[in-house]
Amino acid sequence: MERTLIIIKPDAVQRGLIGEIVARFERRGLRIVGMKLMQMDRDLAARHYAVHKGKSFYESLLDYITSAPVVVMALEGTDAVKAARGTIGATNPADAGAGSIRGDFGLEVGRNLVHGSDSVENGEKEVALFFGESGLLAWGRDVDRWIFEKP
């Protein structure tokens, strides 16, 4: 089973979309193994977005992601990274398909509602950054046998 990190960003939290976004991942079949509402501090934001350091949008990205609460989730499932990114939609909401989170609720790149890990390796790193070793639950849902071919 792969793991991926999802961040429901400040714009989605402020717009009251937490429940809708969580529901889309659950309906997709992904299992929540960690979730918390938090106010991200600048240090954590800088570590999470370190790959963008030096880019023109870096400082404004840190300002934005620390401006209001976020919800972080660790999701687990078969091809979890790919499944989550399909559910989220293209980075630019104008390019995101109808039915995706960004396609249905977003208009601008700078307010694109959700972050999702872009690779399995980054998913593992990002989940560890936000949840550590002991912040995740190992559990099975009764419905898992109807979603996953392998236990």
Image (cartoon, rainbow, N blue to C red):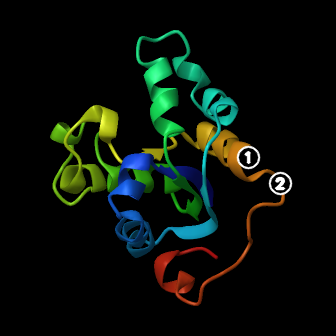
Relative horizontal placement of residue 112, taking residue 19 as reference (left or right): left
Q: Where is residue 98 in the image (x, y as percent from the top left)?
A: 16, 55
Q: How crowded is mark 1: few (under 14 residues within 10 Å), some or many (20 or more)?
A: some
Q: Can residue 114 be seen in this view?
A: no
Q: Mark 1 points at which residue?
A: 128
Badge 1 element: helix
Q: 109 or 88, which is in the foreground?
A: 109
Q: In this view, does 91 lie above or below 39?
A: above
At horizontal 56% and vertical 15% (from top left) the residue drawn is 53
Q: In this view, does 23 lie above or below 125?
A: below
Give the residue furthest to the front. 67
> What amino acid type should be assigned to the residue bearing mark 1?
Ala
Q: Name the residue under label 2.
A: 133
Kindly indicate whether the residue at mark 1 contacts the one at mark 2 (C-beta within 8 angstroms): yes
Relative horizontal placement of residue 132, taking residue 23 as reference (left or right): right
Q: 146 or 112, which is in the foreground?
A: 112
Q: Residues within 10 Å of mark 2 (few under 14, many from 20)?
A: few
Badge 2 element: loop
> What amino acid type should be assigned to the residue bearing mark 2?
Glu
Q: Position of residue 77 (x, y in %)?
A: 55, 64
Q: Quadrant of residue 92?
A: top left
Q: Position of residue 33 (x, y in %)?
A: 65, 67
Q: Which tag, 2 or 1, sits closer to the chain's start?
A: 1
Q: Quadrant of residue 3?
A: bottom right
**Can you say which quadrant of the picture contains the N terminus?**
bottom right
As measured in the structure, the alpha-carbon distance from the residue carrying label 2 to the one carrying label 1 is 7 Å
Give the residue furthest to the bottom. 142
At horizontal 57% and vertical 50% (from top left) the residue drawn is 5
Q: 39 or 50, which is in the foreground?
A: 39
At horizontal 45% and vertical 34% (from top left) the residue drawn is 64
Relative horizontal placement of residue 7, taking residue 127 as reference (left or right): left
